[in-house]
Image: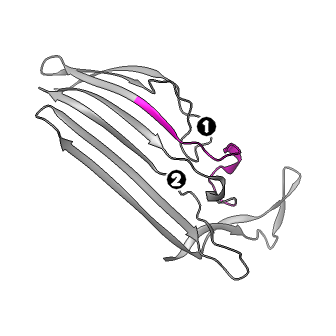
């Protein structure tokens, strides 16, 4: 448990709890250190050499948080800006400074009841069933052309999945191809 968690709550501006904003009466809210909350989570990483030239990697993050119940409240409410479970997993072939890898990026579902309606979770952009889970498949590689030049290529979101990072408010890019030349001396 931690004290003085930042939450968006009722506030006043020049002594008023409501102001006119674009000719619309609007409640005054502000981020304030004033509630007790419970926050817990787990982040785990794996980097393992399966063979001399093949490595496996994975990471996952899980976080949960809630504003503790206050007098008169029926139950605790969700803490603002808690992402759903997310991570990355894949494999990498590497030899003589060059590599090729395939990996997935994934994001779990965020249920509507896990959103803080007063906060910055962008609840208004969530579909009626909550923010859906998603997975993207990605491949990339690099090849060293001599001592000073490396070429990198990749395809992100290979399956052209439509997805959105949590609380971003905009969809992420579809399938995209890229190439990079890196030099050093």
Magenta stretch bounds: 118-137
Instruction: Identify the element where label 1 is drawn.
Output: loop
Tell me the residue that label 2 is attached to: 83
Residue shown at the point (81%, 69%) measured from the top left:
17
Percent position of residue 95, x then y:
13, 27
Percent position of residue 153, x then y:
32, 20
Is residue 124 shown in magenta?
yes
Instruction: Identify the element where label 2 is drawn.
Output: loop
Percent position of residue 23, x then y:
89, 51
**Res 125 → quadrant:** top right
Residue 27 appears left or right of 32: right
Q: Main secondary structure of the magenta part?
A: loop
Image quadrant occupied by the C terminus: top left
Tell me the residue that label 1 is attached to: 170
Residue shown at the point (26%, 48%) measured from the top left:
46
Residue shown at the point (10%, 34%) measured from the top left:
52
């Amino acid at each position: 448990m931690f004290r003085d968690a930042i939450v968006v709550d009722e506030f006043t501006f020049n002594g008023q709890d409501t102001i006119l904003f674009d000719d619309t009466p609007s409640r005054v809210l502000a981020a304030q250190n004033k509630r007790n909350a419970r926050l817990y989570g787990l982040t785990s990483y794996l980097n393992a050499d399966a063979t001399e030239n093949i490595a496996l990697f994975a990471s996952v993050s899980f976080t949960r948080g809630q504003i503790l119940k206050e007098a008169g409240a029926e139950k605790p409410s969700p803490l603002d800006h808690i992402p759903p479970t997310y991570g990355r997993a894949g494999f990498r072939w590497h030899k003589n400074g060059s590599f090729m890898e395939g990996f997935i990026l994934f994001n779990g579902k965020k249920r509507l009841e896990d959103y803080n309606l007063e906060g910055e979770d962008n609840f208004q952009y969530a579909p009626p069933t909550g923010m859906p889970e998603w997975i993207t498949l990605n491949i990339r590689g690099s090849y060293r052309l001599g001592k000073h030049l490396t070429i990198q290529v990749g395809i992100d979101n290979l399956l052209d999945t439509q997805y959105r990072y949590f609380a971003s408010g905009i969809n992420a890019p579809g399938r995209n191809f890229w190439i990079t030349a890196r030099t050093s001396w």
